[in-house]
């Protein structure tokens, strides 16, 4: 973002979109509305096979009340924001094999200090505390909140691949052509890493309809821009790190373009400013003389005065 991006207008536009999306649809899917009051069944459950904790709830709450074993569903929440940083597909440059496990697709969102965004951050702290209560004391690393310039920000990411040894129960799935068109990731992973459903990120574009028949269509991730208003679907996962400690990460599940207006407006203003700068600073044509053109008229007169005696 630069001086051409209309921050105040974009913040108002985002807040209007948030109001519309949080007033319709199930409240439990919105991060801003998530709290412990959503139900006692919303708890962190360990996945024993790989020591990973996820935020999950039983699909059938009656099973919990009856003390029965039920099927758990990972809780995926939604947050709206403005992209201030991104690293999204496709992958075009070569990747060293020893670095492929660290490559991520990510977006960083901000809302220019909107009160709505602060509520989302507060709820992330509540979720972190919920995990912490289920784990050994002081074993969960504290949250480190981010800043974009002077504004609060949240980064959500997902790695492109997972260690095959750490995911024995997960099946390998192919990369989408919009993610790895040249098979760079596929080649770099070798036999040690796999791309699974846990690494998959969906990309959509929202098409509103006045009659209420809104549509979501697949979108090429290369078309997202800094300054776009988007909705991100994310889940919260706690993974083991060094020294018997754990860390909570915000896992990217989907990105949906809601409104590119303010990004496009800033691009137009920027282009006009660059055009005006060029027009007010015209190119100067620099001429150069090479040869003896200036001397050509004088030389014959001198030669005419010369006699044989002078030679």
Image (tube, rainbow, N blue to C red):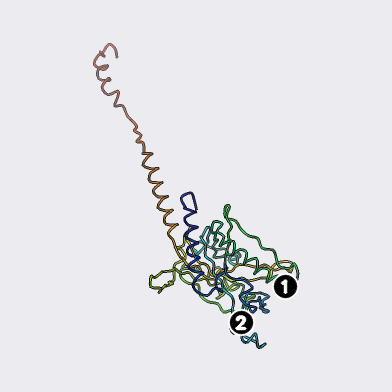
Q: CA distance from mark 1 to mark 2?
A: 20 Å
Task: Report x, y in % for residue 162.
Answer: 60, 72
Q: Image quadrant for the C terminus?
A: top left
- Secondary structure of the residue carrying tag 1 is loop
Tell which of 26 and 268 is nearer to you.
26
Which quarter of the figure has residue 45?
A: bottom right
Question: In the figure, is residue 170 to the left or right of 221?
Answer: right
- How packed mark 1 is, by other alpha carbons closer than 10 Å (few <14, some 14-19, many 20 or more), is some
Q: Is residue 23 visible?
A: yes
Task: Report x, y in % for residue 222.
Answer: 46, 63
- Reading the image, the residue beneath label 1 is 135
Name the residue at the right extreme.
137
Residue shown at the point (37%, 39%) measured from the top left: 280
Q: Specify the label residue 58 is tagged with.
A: 2
Question: Height in image: 56 above or below 151?
Answer: below
Tell which of 146 and 8 is nearer to you.
8
Residue shown at the point (65%, 86%) measured from the top left: 65
Task: Report x, y in % for residue 79.
Answer: 54, 67
């Amino acid at each position: 973002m630069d001086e051409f991006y209309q921050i105040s207008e974009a913040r108002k536009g985002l807040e209007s979109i948030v109001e519309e999306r949080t007033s319709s649809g199930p409240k439990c899917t919105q991060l801003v509305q998530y709290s412990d009051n959503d139900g006692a069944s919303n708890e962190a459950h360990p996945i024993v096979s790989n020591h990973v904790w996820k935020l999950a709830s039983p699909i059938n709450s009656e099973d919990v009340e009856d003390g029965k074993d039920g099927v758990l569903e990972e809780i995926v929440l939604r947050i709206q924001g403005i992209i201030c940083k991104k690293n999204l597909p496709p992958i075009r440059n070569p990747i060293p094999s020893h670095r492929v496990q660290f490559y991520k697709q990510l977006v960083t969102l901000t809302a220019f200090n909107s009160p709505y965004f602060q509520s989302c951050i507060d709820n992330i702290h509540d979720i972190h505390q919920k995990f912490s209560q289920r784990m050994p004391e002081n074993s969960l690393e504290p949250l480190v909140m981010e800043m974009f310039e002077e504004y609060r920000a949240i980064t959500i990411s997902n790695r492109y691949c997972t260690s095959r040894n750490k995911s024995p129960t997960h099946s390998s799935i192919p990369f989408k052509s919009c993610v790895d068109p040249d098979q760079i990731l596929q080649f770099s992973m070798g036999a040690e890493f796999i791309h699974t459903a846990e690494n998959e990120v969906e990309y959509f574009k929202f098409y509103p309809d006045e009659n209420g028949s809104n549509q979501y269509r697949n979108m090429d991730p290369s078309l997202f821009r800094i300054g776009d208003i988007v909705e991100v679907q994310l889940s919260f996962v706690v993974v083991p790190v060094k020294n018997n400690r754990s860390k909570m990460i915000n896992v990217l599940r989907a990105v949906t373009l809601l409104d590119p207006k303010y990004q496009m407006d800033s691009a137009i203003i920027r282009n006009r400013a660059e055009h005006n700068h060029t027009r007010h600073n015209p190119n100067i044509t620099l001429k150069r003389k090479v040869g003896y053109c200036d001397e050509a008229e004088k030389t014959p007169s001198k030669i005419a005065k010369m006699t044989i005696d002078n030679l």
